[in-house]
Image (spheres, helix red, strand yellow):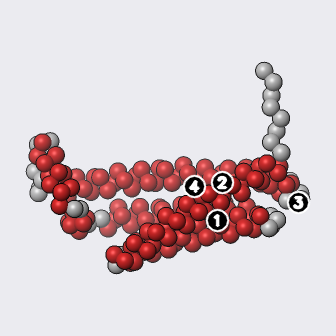
Amino acid sequence: MTKSPPTLPERKLQRVLTISRADSIGVLVCSGSSLLLSLLAGDATFALFSALALAAGGMEAHGNRRLREGGPDGLQWLTGAQGCLYTVVVGYALWRLNFFDAAAYWEQVPAPAREQFEAKMREAGLDPVADRAQLLAFVNFLVCSVLLVVSTLYQGGLAFWYSRQRAAVLAALGYEAPRA
């Protein structure tokens, strides 16, 4: 079997630019939308986490722009944005785990969904009133756990991938990578 030739530095730079642009746009749109919705709902805590995530998206967009302009520091911005966003996600998950209010959450659930949920609880042999808080807390724990695992894999993987592209990106920009 023949081995394919290594990817050219310019091609790797183009991949970094494409991925970082798509990721930053996704983070900016999602966090900007959640910031707007949380402000409209009067949820200051979620607005704070959304604003912090928006800042992380801005960091990544800035890193992308710096690389497009030929600045070698753009890659540090991209990697740092992943660490920043991961910190925001971990902070949010820890906040949700520590300050989850099952009664307040239940009040936000639409009436048809509440009725369906209570019917399913009765089918499972659970008391909808007595067991609801414990079940909602467990669901909250599962959601936060999945969020942390996915964020660890995604933000960690992306930061690792950005750092692995460093030498090629610097070469494509006309800089010499420092030797380890």
In the rendered image of this protein, does residue 7 appear above or below residue 141? above
The tag earlier along the polypeptide, 4 or 1, is: 1
Name the front one of labels 4 and 2. 2
Q: Residues within 10 Å of mark 2 (few under 14, many from 20)?
A: some
Residue on which disc 3 sits: 175
The tag earlier along the polypeptide, 2 or 3, is: 2
Secondary structure under the numbered disc 4 in the rendered image = helix
Residue on which disc 2 sits: 19
The tag earlier along the polypeptide, 3 or 1, is: 1
Residue that appears at 40% across and 63% down: 94
Q: Identify the amino acid type marked 1.
A: Glu
Residue 150 percent across, percent down from the top left? 49, 50
In the rendered image of this protein, does residue 159 appear above or below residue 120? below
Q: Residues within 10 Å of mark 3 (few under 14, many from 20)?
A: some
Distance CA(mark 4)–CA(mark 1): 12 Å
Residue that appears at 35% across and 61% down: 97
Q: Are marks 3 and 1 in contact (CB under 8 Å)?
A: no
- The answer to whether residue 179 is left or right of residue 13 is right
Residue on which disc 1 sits: 60
Distance CA(mark 2)–CA(mark 3): 22 Å
Residue on which disc 4 sits: 155
Distance CA(mark 4)–CA(mark 3): 27 Å
Residue 126 percent across, percent down from the top left? 12, 47
Residue that appears at 77% across and 64% down: 68
Distance CA(mark 4)–CA(mark 2): 13 Å
